Amino acid sequence: TLAQGTFPNYDDPMVAQPSLPHPRASGGAPCAKVTPIVDAQLVGYNQVVVGHYEPPSDCAAPWQQVVMELSGAVAGVQFDRYGAVWFRGVEVLRTTTPEPSPSGIVWRVDKDLSDYAAIFKSPGNVTLMIPNVVDSTYTGVLHINITFSFFSSHGGGTTSLDVMPLRNPTIGANPFGEIAVNGAVGQANLVQVPRDTIDARLDLYASGHGCEEFWYTNSLNASSGGCGGGAYREIRVYVDGKLAGAQYPFPVIYTGGVNPLLWRPLTGILSFDIPAYRFDLTPFLGWLTDGHQHNITLAIVDNWHGTWYLDGVLVLRRDTEDVAGGSVDIVEEGPPSIEQTSQNESGIMVQRMRSNSGFRVQGVLRLANGSTIASEVFSHLTAWSTNRFLSENSQETVGRWHGVVGSVRDGKVQTTVSNFPLEVKDFSAQDSATFQLNACVKYARDIDSFYGDYVVAVRNEMKSCAVYNRSLTNRSQINVQEGQSSEDFSIWAGPKARFQPRTMMHCNQCYSRKLASHDGAIVTNSGQSGCAWPHGVYVCGNELCGSFSAKHVRSDTEMVQNGAGSAAGVGDLHLSGAIGDVSANGTAGQCLLPMRRGPHAAEEPDTLRHQLVCRPGTGRHQSAWVDVPNILV
């Protein structure tokens, strides 16, 4: 039993992803900042906050980088809340908020919006909606600020892209109501694409709620007490009824998900910034650029009773003249092959899912000058999962979702390989006196992006366990509150010939960071950062930004990483907790904590032996074996 009041008071939320890189020529400092929303106080479920934006007069476009910063504060008692930010009707952030501590927490999200830079050239409204409830029980008022920062490269901005929402959710009183997809019905959008468009991408912001928040745990039979629909979900995009894209959704777990103590203070993967799923629609431009309206439909496979908020944004590159024509060839399409079974095994109901799907589309654009652009998109998805319903209040889920999504343009191939492994153990019980929640989660988001012979690989893994027990007769009597978690984030970038996916978590990363927490306090924060981005693409938080160039970009426009993230992704890297700061011969140095066991480590010991490698200011390497608590036993 923990002393009352020591937990759930906890450190400010933290993530392991790197801070955003900035153009080298900017020195890491923006040329201007604009803050359209200051201390918005969210207290109502249908409350919408609107702030007005004016372009910065002292730093005119074009800009090389545009960054949005959302900072928040909350104290007291409150659920996690979903939310979004729109500018001029274009969604720029899908998010969820952390559950507060009694004394209060602050957090921050930095979002690279450089591809959307064109919409910031004109004035417009910034719309914020985070449905919240404040009353005598749920006392947490959400305080939110939104700032846009602009970075100039002194040598010209990014390639100009046009940005167009499939629909403008902010024209109604409830923006989320405008983008809600309930049940099996898809969302149809009529759009007219400019006739001079030669490259088209759809950014699809998507998140599941209600019965779809934990879609990967859903039973096949809704009457059994679950939400139904089974444990398979797939995001699909159609152009005029033809399949144009398919991806698996990542199993985002919000900060109150499964057991709230799992995510204090290490918040779940993507929970603060759910990036848009990207679909290349270039092969369909032979249809879309004919000057007429076309139907782009968004759908979730096997959504029976829940709600998904789907909001699409078209990102377009245009030519100087109208496209002369083109063709679209549907090479392969069809519904996903899904096999789901449920049967009693030794008194336990076990549900198994296996699936695969794929498609391929080719297109040709004829330009006004007589030249052609050949393009192709393809995907192959495979998934499996097992749900064991141990009792009415106990369930184990394990699965993996694997996807290969690619684009070809004039023979140049870009491919993204994703792997989402997941394990969830969720247990609850009560007797005449107490109620208890017990949970463990282990999951990862592994993304390998191939640009010809160049690779950017990102690995993000979390492991977390928590126990909560309180009295049924006296709700303020907390008997047990325990939580412990760890997070690893690493980046590898370089030639494909040197890429070794099985070992990249252990060596040769340009960025690596390890966080660990115990009962609300950060006890480990170690790593190193030294990524260079000479080819135009760069890791921006938890996704990739920029565009690839086979040649090195100009040195003044190259993005430079300035250390690791801190509270929710910003700040300087430091060592803390049981390891602390290290110095050698009176000179401070950098220390790395490799993820490997030292000699004499037992199979699952209470402590692990790790080699702490220090690089003191003298340039010599020193090492020592240190005992680190094994929080995953």
Image (spheres, grey):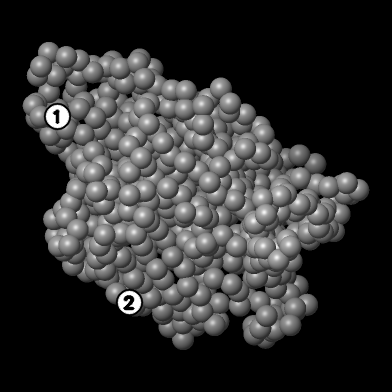
- As drawn, 240 above or below 124: above
Where does label 1 land, which residue? 319
Along the viewing direction, whichever of 99 and 178 lies nearer the viewer: 99
Q: Position of residue 442 (x, y in %)?
A: 66, 49
Position of 214 relative to 518 (above/below) = above
Badge count: 2
Say which quarter of the image contains residue 334: top left
Specify whether residue 589 is in view.
yes
Q: Position of residue 342 (x, y in %)?
A: 64, 38
The residue indicated by pointer 2 is 39
**What's the residue at 51%, 27% (across, down)?**
495
Residue in the foreground of this view, choosing between 525 and 219: 525
Quadrant showing the N terminus: bottom right
Q: Which mark is residue 305?
A: none
Residue 296 appears at what percent x and percent y? 25, 36
Give me the residue at 29% from left, 54% from top. 151
Q: Nearer the viewer, residue 64 or 69?
A: 64
**Horizontal side, residue 168 vs residue 10: left or right:** left
Q: Is residue 541 shown to the viewer in this render? A: no
Relative height, residue 205 to residue 482 (above, below) = above
Element type where label 2 sits in the image: strand
